[in-house]
Image (cartoon, rainbow, N blue to C red):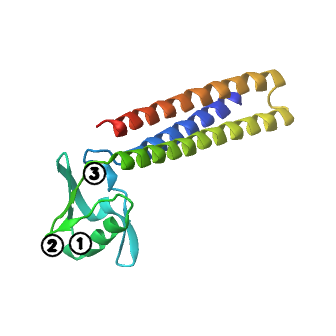
């Protein structure tokens, strides 16, 4: 019983770290990366779709992203979505291809992105702690239902704490790496 709870908890914590890493990929650095825009929402034909579903994305240069829509009629909607996003990039279009020149980051913008990383990291930590709380609640229920002993509960709680520390450390390491990448000039 405790093994099942620990496995489920570890899975939840792993998912939280993976979600955080995906969120980090969307935080802009000085280099062009299609991950900045691929999950951007675009309103087209009365539906909201991700940009990656509507266009071919590329990064031909370190400071340039290209978006080649599959349907030329979607160019205006994609341009609008990019302009309304918080990326701070002005798209340029020739009617077929949308070019996104990635300007170098100013010191102020870098600090804003670092704050964004810290916010996302805290959200990830909260998610990990929620998984810990859920596991502890499940262990208490198991003790009340006489499925496990109190000693097993204490051992499992210790294991849950070790998992929590491990995944929070992993999350913090990813945040520090992204912060270092952002502050690199």
Residue 1, x across and y down, in percent: 71, 31
As measured in the structure, the alpha-carbon distance from the residue carrying label 3 to the one carrying label 2 is: 20 Å
Q: Residue at x 13, y 70 (%)?
A: 94
As measured in the structure, the alpha-carbon distance from the residue carrying label 3 to the one carrying label 1 is: 17 Å
Q: Is residue 124 above or below residue 173?
A: below
Q: Which mark is residue 95?
A: 2
Choose the circle earlier in sequence order: 2 or 1: 1
Labelled pair 3, 1 in contact (Cβ < 8 Å): no
Q: Residue at x 40, y 32 (%)?
A: 177
> Image quadrant of residue 130?
top right
Residue 182, x across and y down, in percent: 36, 40
> Image quadrant of residue 37?
bottom left
Q: Which mark is residue 75?
A: 1
Residue 25, x across and y down, in percent: 37, 45
Q: Secondary structure at mark 3?
A: helix
Would residue 41 appear left or right of 185 to someone viewing this image? right
Label 3 packing within 10 angstroms: few (<14), some (14-19), many (20+): some
Q: Which residue is mark 3?
A: 34
Label 1 packing within 10 angstroms: few (<14), some (14-19), many (20+): many
As measured in the structure, the alpha-carbon distance from the residue carrying label 2 to the one carrying label 1 is: 7 Å
Would residue 178 appear left or right of 71 to someone viewing this image? right
Q: Residue at x 32, y 67 (%)?
A: 83
> Image quadrant of residue 62?
top left
Labelled pair 2, 1 in contact (Cβ < 8 Å): yes
Q: Is residue 39 above or below residue 183?
A: below
Q: Secondary structure at mark 2?
A: loop
Residue 4, x across and y down, in percent: 65, 32
The answer to whether residue 59 is visible is: yes
């Amino acid at each position: 019983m405790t093994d099942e709870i620990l496995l489920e908890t570890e899975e939840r914590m792993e998912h939280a770290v993976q979600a955080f890493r995906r969120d980090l990929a969307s935080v802009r650095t000085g280099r062009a990366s299609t991950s900045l825009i691929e999950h951007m929402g675009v309103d087209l034909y009365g539906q909201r779709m991700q940009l990656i579903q509507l266009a071919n994305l590329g990064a031909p240069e370190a400071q340039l992203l290209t978006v080649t829509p599959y349907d030329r009629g979607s160019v205006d909607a994609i341009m609008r979505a990019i302009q309304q996003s918080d990326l701070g990039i002005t798209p340029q279009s020739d009617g077929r291809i949308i070019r996104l020149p990635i300007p170098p980051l100013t010191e102020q913008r870098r600090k804003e992105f670092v704050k964004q990383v810290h916010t996302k990291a805290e959200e990830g930590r909260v998610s990990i702690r929620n998984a810990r709380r859920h596991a502890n609640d499940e262990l208490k229920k198991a003790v009340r239902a006489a499925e496990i002993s109190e000693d097993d509960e204490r051992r499992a709680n210790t294991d849950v704490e070790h998992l929590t520390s491990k995944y929070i450390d992993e999350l913090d390491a990813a945040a520090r790496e992204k912060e270092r990448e952002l502050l690199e000039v």
